[in-house]
Image (cartoon, helix red, strand yellow):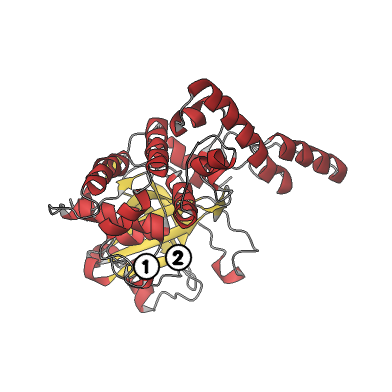
Amino acid sequence: MLSRTRKTVEHEIKNGFANVPRGCSIQLEKQAQDYILENIRNAVNNKKNLISKLHDFMEIKQELNVREFFEGYHVTPQDVYSKKVTVVGLAAQAGLLKGYKGDQERERLLAGALGRLSFVNSRRWIRFIQKILPQIQSSKGILTHLLPAVERTMLSMFYYTVFGKGLDDLGNRFPSIEAAIYWVIDDPSLYGELNGLLDYQYVKIDFVDKSLAELGNESPLDLYCSYTTDQILVALGKHTEEKKSSFREGVLYLSEKKLDVFFVTLNKSEKDYSPSTMYQDYSINEELFHWQSQSRTTEESVTGQRYINQAVNGGNVLFFVREYKEEEKFTSPYTCLGLADLQSHYGSAPISIVWKMKESLPGFVMKKTVKV
């Protein structure tokens, strides 16, 4: 009954089973709800259970392999990384890695990065990371060859996934992003965990992506893949390697590219959003998407005119969509839906617009975006 959502049963119980199919409802008395939630907390992969599973795994395998641990012991990456630890760190705490002396700063930084990477589902980007990291390791952070522009951008996306700041914001601690990445992977055990997670993410991909050809050959973004806000801003050229740009709104206009970028959260919690940002955004069918502008945007405004005259002015609109603001204690990434053209509009402040997607939305995306 909950197959259309990736939220946990615990989340559904706490929020009144909002995602059951139409015509269905589940109601629990308060005492029953508390009883079931307590049972779930005792059964889920808490720290104690994870360490117990690691003991069993190491007794059989003798060597830590993160991908095999996730696949064979019903453990998800989010089970581990939401606790701000790494698998290596848990194994070290349990005394399963003899002689291992980790760096607390590096492990704490990488635990957050691995959590963000646990949502990565772009084949192209995963394979690039797996190709470039050995080169950075062998060269000790000093690449002797120039990367093509798109690969340089993908490397910068990985750097921001780990550090979340530009080099300048790190106080010139590292001379380059390669040097910063080398410092992160200069621990064989943690480097092995990173590679194991990337392998796990790659084999888990169950859809066919497409390239965003309209954005040019130098775009690292692929249709239907998930990206964090930082990764998207790097890919669009807003974040540079040296400096992180400021971005707080749900819309971004890149005048030099004549590109409007929409960051859409479909299920908004009143706790996290003000009444002025509770927009009506949803897909009508595989081709049409209903979207509302910001509440202060009128038809007569410069922004409103840009939206309405998008086709005439030769502009483009790019959609990124997520179901919830948070998922498994992490900020949810956005799914790239691709470019769209204006179909119709009505109203003002906000303007309601129906966009026609240039690529039809596949079923697994429609499950998230359709309004129930």
Q: Quadrant of residue 40?
A: top right
Closer to the camera in the image, 100 or 311: 100
Compared across the picture, whether 242 is left or right of 263 comes to: left
Residue 42 in view: yes
- Quadrant of the image occupied by residue 128: top left
- Say what amino acid the circle numbered 2 marks: Gly
Q: Position of residue 89 (x, y in %)?
A: 52, 44
Q: Which residue is mark 2?
A: 250
Circle 2 packing at 10 Å, graded few (<14), some (14-19), many (20+), is: some
Up-down relation of residue 45 to residue 313 (above or below)? above
Residue 63: x, y in percent? 46, 28
Residue at the limit of the structure toward the top, as seen here: 60
- Residue 9 position in % (x across, y down): 67, 39
Q: Look at 36% across and 56% down and name the residue there.
A: 231
Q: Nearer the viewer, residue 259 or 60?
A: 60
Q: Is residue 46 visible?
A: no
- The answer to which quarter of the image holds residue 166 is bottom left
x, y percent for residue 259: 28, 64
Residue 231 lies, with reference to residue 130, above or below; the image says below
Under mark 1, the amino acid is Leu
Q: CA distance from mark 1 to mark 2?
A: 7 Å
Residue at figure coordinates x 47%, y 46% from the top left: 101
Quadrant placement of the N terminus: top right
What secondary structure is found at the residue carrying circle 2?
loop
Q: Which mark is residue 184?
A: none
Q: Which residue is mark 1?
A: 252
* Relative horizontal placement of residue 356, taking residue 283 as reference (left or right): left
Q: In front: 45, or 180?
A: 180
